[in-house]
Image: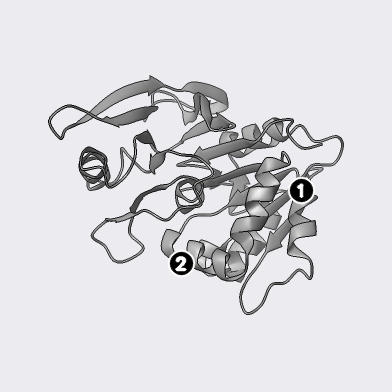
Amino acid sequence: MASDAPTILATSGGFLPGKRTSLRPGPLIEHALELSRPRSLPRVCFIGTAQGDQAHWAAAVHAAFYGRDVLVSCLNLFPMPNIADVQAHLLSQDLVWVGGGSTANLLALWRLHGLDKVLRRCWEQGVVLAGVSAGSICWHVGGTTDSYGPELQAITDGLGLLPWSNGVHYDSEPQRRPLYHQLVSQGVLPAGYATDNGVGLHYRGVELVEAVTEVVGRAAYRVERGPGGTATETRIEARPLPGALGPS
């Protein structure tokens, strides 16, 4: 059973280091599963386009759910789609999780394969869309990206399911905050929301419901264009999820 309303969880977190496997689903992924309200066996599809559909990532994602009653699949676009009917497969999912990497490459390939339209239909029909970094920015109008090189640049051609901009890794990469402020203040990007590492934004429809975190003390931020070509930033306290780590 998919969510009863269009739902997105846009994050700067997700999988964490595992004990018996290289990865484990962190509290943000567990929360995304809860938001999907599956009727029985949860169906989760991982999309790794932003990292070039690396086989080791797909294997690690499958292994992360060993021993769990979760049906996991991976959608690859390299060297060709690995699923005959991509739309039917994604519409049958409870949760689609998009990994991080190159936002620009992800968007280009999705449009080439018509995945932008498929994912919009999934969102409209209640499949929960979620992801980290590139898998967060993609649902918005745009944000800041290192897709073009180590110096961050603006990306302004996101899917636009959400009418906001998005800043990720806000507390961990020094270029992120000042560039995001600059882009919003200049009108290159619309107002939007940013997340510290470990924080997620839960949207219902196009409205922010709450910020949640897998690391206590970290936050989200509302960034808007202010008077005189400035940007104003408002801190949004994030609700700690079950299993959240202590402050670091």
What element does badge 1 sit on?
loop
Q: Position of residue 132 (x, y in %)?
A: 50, 47
What element does badge 2 sit on?
helix
- Any part of residue 47 in sight: no
- Which residue bears the numbered disc 2? 105
The answer to whether residue 171 is left or right of residue 77 is left
Q: How packed is label 2: few (under 14 Cα within 10 Å), some, or many (20 or more)?
A: some
Q: Is residue 8 above or below residue 152?
A: above
Q: Position of residue 28 (x, y in %)?
A: 57, 35
Gap in Å between the C-alphas at discs 2 and 1? 24 Å
Name the residue nearer the viewer: 169 or 83: 83
The answer to whether residue 15 is left or right of residue 64 is left
Mark 1: amino acid: Gln
> Which numbered circle lies on residue 93?
1
Q: Position of residue 227 (x, y in %)?
A: 16, 27
Residue at the extreme right: 40
